[in-house]
Image: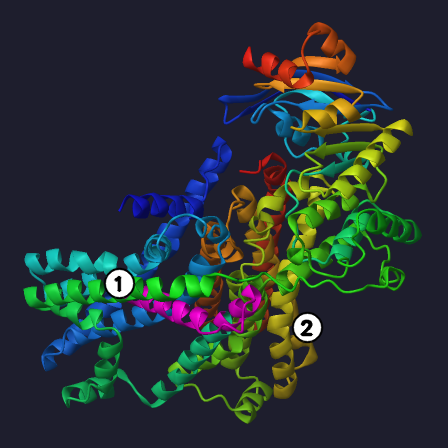
Amino acid sequence: MNSYLTLTKTFIAAISMSAPQDKRRKIMIVILSLFGIFGVLLPVAIAVGILVKLMTETLIPIGCESLGIQLMFHVICLFTVIFGINVIFNEFYFSNDIEYLLPWPLRAYQIIASKFTAAFYNENMMQFVLVLSCIIGFGIGSKMGILNWLLSIIGIITLPIIPLAYCGILSMVMMAFTKLIRSKDMIQRISVALIFIMVIALVSSIGFLQNMDIDTYVETLAAGDQTFFTVMNYIFPNVPLFVKTFSEGSFPAFLGYIAVNAAVITIMLFLSEKLYFKGVIGLTSSDSRKKEQDITKLLTSCKQHSPAYSYFMKEVRILIRTPVFFTNCIAINFLWPIFVYAMLKIQHYEIALEKLRHLYAHRDLRIQLFFLLGIVGISVIVAAVNSLSSNAISREGKHFSFMKYIPVPYFTQWNVKTFVGILFPAIGVLVYFLPVCILIRIPIVHIVLFTLLSLMSITFVSHMGIYIDSIQPKLIWDDEMSALRENYNTFFSMAISIAFTVVVCVGGFFLFCNTKISIGFTALILVLILAAANLVVLILTAKSGVRNIEEQEET
Amino acid sequence: MIQIKNVTKTYNGTVRAVDNLNLTVNNGEIVGFIGPNGAGKTTTLKMMTGILKPDSGSIFINDFDMQSEPLKAKQVIGYIADSPDMFLRLKGLEFMNLISDIYKVPTDVRRERIKTFASRFDLSEVLDKPMQSYSHGMRQKMMVAAALVHDPAVWILDEPLTGLDPKSAYALKNMMREHADAGNSVLFSTHVLEVAEKLCDKVIIINHGKSLFYGTLDELTARYPDMDLEKIFLEMTAHE
């Protein structure tokens, strides 16, 4: 038990971000945290709570009031598996501490128990807020009693245990039985490919919702067809037991919930004894074979370039060659059309090229507005989700000192990093958007305007992301995944970007619909807003961004 | 030439890592920086290279003030950090080119220098491999080669011999001597007193951020006539 507690404390300490030392940075972190909580977490929690309340009230007449919250919990568990698998892989197999742990007289289950707890602690924050808001929504909707409220406490914290344990079991089985693949990079690529396949499958399956609305679904449930729940309850048995615990105040369900969690954890720890060392020993970083080189031939590739170009190439090579960065920062820029497709399907939009061409050609204002606001929204979100800029300084990790001792001005290094943060999302957005514009036969002037808006949006997010990261970069991390997932700066940057998108796009929509301004004037307002936003971040960069790097010490 | 004048550095406002330190490394000298763990050696070296900012005092590298002319000062430094695990996703040659570009080394010159280092440190076979696949010693050799590829006048080396095989350590020590003899300055930290004894013109011994001794080895041994360097070091640091 002592080993477990000591190891767990160490792992948790290793993933925590250090607090800034000086007052100015502390104040900025507090402001960003408050914005994150009140600007994003709380509105999301309230929206989820209201949704569950409405679902509960709708389902009360047919006696299935708990199905709404059950659905939400299944979705939360499913997403925990999707996003947790890479975290668990990294925590169990790829963190740098593994090579120190292996020679110690520790049992596999002790290492896995501690690493699992650390990963659970790290991943639990968002789920905690969502589960809590679901229960509050349900509690209000179904007028829950005090005992039920008390019983619900257990699941608020423990609901993600089983999905994360599934990730743990899956990772151990995969690692133990893929003996041929001993390269960390290859395994990381496979695990990330699995996630992408799962996300694409999930999003694509949303297409089936096209012909379904809430009334018909309630009718289906009332008719007794609960196939979806039957399947999901087998996969996540903790969900129905937990829901029954607090919705009916059932003690047997409460005990069942504890038993099923304990059983899955026991299975994971039992398997760890059989599989963990089998999978973790012998992992290599990459090929180390030497081969004869003709040095003179090799040196012909050496050519002088400017420091900025070389620094840019260094950034790009690291991003492309590090599997975690490649998938989370580069590849993700090219996935947005899948999500747009899913959103359009959910909202029952028919996506026919001919129809769009016709509407645009006939100056349908709604479709023009859709493109105008859409390109800003997509560009901001894509640039924020990839974490390229909000992780740009944290990514340096232990090599942060390199930025400081080389004779390249901080401002140049900053601009190169900003450019990298602009380049990939810009390619990712425009590589799809421009051909679509051409296919729809959008006038060239409009295409130029959309491209300008897209680049202005991405530039804003890139500058803002690096500025946020410069306040308190996460420089101590064990593996690249930790640099991304355990870095609050990526969350702050995303929070601001989402808020910005909502304000600009929703604001623009209402402004256009409720006033008599023309589409051209709306476009002009958007350009001005983006120019002002860029100006603000540029002033911030010039005023204190570079100073943040200058004053940042390594820890 | 390196000049450190009244430099002080405190961490978190409480831990004084370097306390009013003064040091001059003249051209043509190799100076060994000696002290127990946590004495303030790495902090001092990091202040000299611009990684850390001193709370007070000033640092001049070849007469360039690190505070007011940092880029000029950094341009003349060759710095080897205490960890060689840097940019491991890059190939050795890519890393050498990155450093060469940063220090603006012309194409022909860099080709010649890379070839020389590759031969001296047995790096030819791995230049085209990602540094991730190198052993610790091989990474350290790559760091040494990269730090010196622009032929800097001032060498600041943090434990440069750690992890090097005997042949490479010998080569580096010879290079340090040649570099100093050519009228340049070398400052390096080490825990190996024998290396300091054989290689250094002067040594500085520090503990708790304060200079305990700075001078030639003859001056040091004259102070403690019946002791070898190891005992002198233990005696000095024990009484601090």
Residue nearer the viewer, A88 or A103: A103
The structure residue drawn at horizontal position 60% and vertical position 19%, both measured from the top left corner, is B209
Region of the chain picked out in magenta, as a range: A162-191
Subunit that carries the residue with mark 1: A
Label 1 environment density (alpha carbons within 10 Å; few <14, some 14–19, many ≥20): many
The mark closer to the camera, 1 or 2, is 1
The image shows residue A166, relative to residue A408, as above or below, that is below
Q: What distance separates the C-alpha of mark 1 from that of mark 2?
A: 56 Å
The structure residue drawn at horizontal position 69% and vertical position 79%, both measured from the top left corner, is A444
Magenta stretch prevailing secondary structure? helix
Residue nearer the viewer, B60 or A339: B60
Q: Quadrant of residue A83?
A: bottom left
Label 2 environment density (alpha carbons within 10 Å; few <14, some 14–19, many ≥20): few
Q: Quadrant of residue B2?
A: top right
Residue tagged 2 = A448
The image shows residue A442, relative to residue A92, as above or below, that is below
Residue A180 inside the magenta-drawn segment: yes
Residue B218, which numbered label? none
Side (left or right) of A335 relative to B184: left
Disc 1 or 2, which lies upstream in sequence? 1
Give amino acid for label 2: Val
Q: Position of residue A375 (x, y in %)?
A: 56, 71
Mark 1 secondary-structure assignment: helix
Q: Position of residue B84 (x, y in %)?
A: 66, 45
Give amino acid for label 1: Ile
Residue A122 inside the magenta-drawn segment: no
Residue tagged 1 = A265
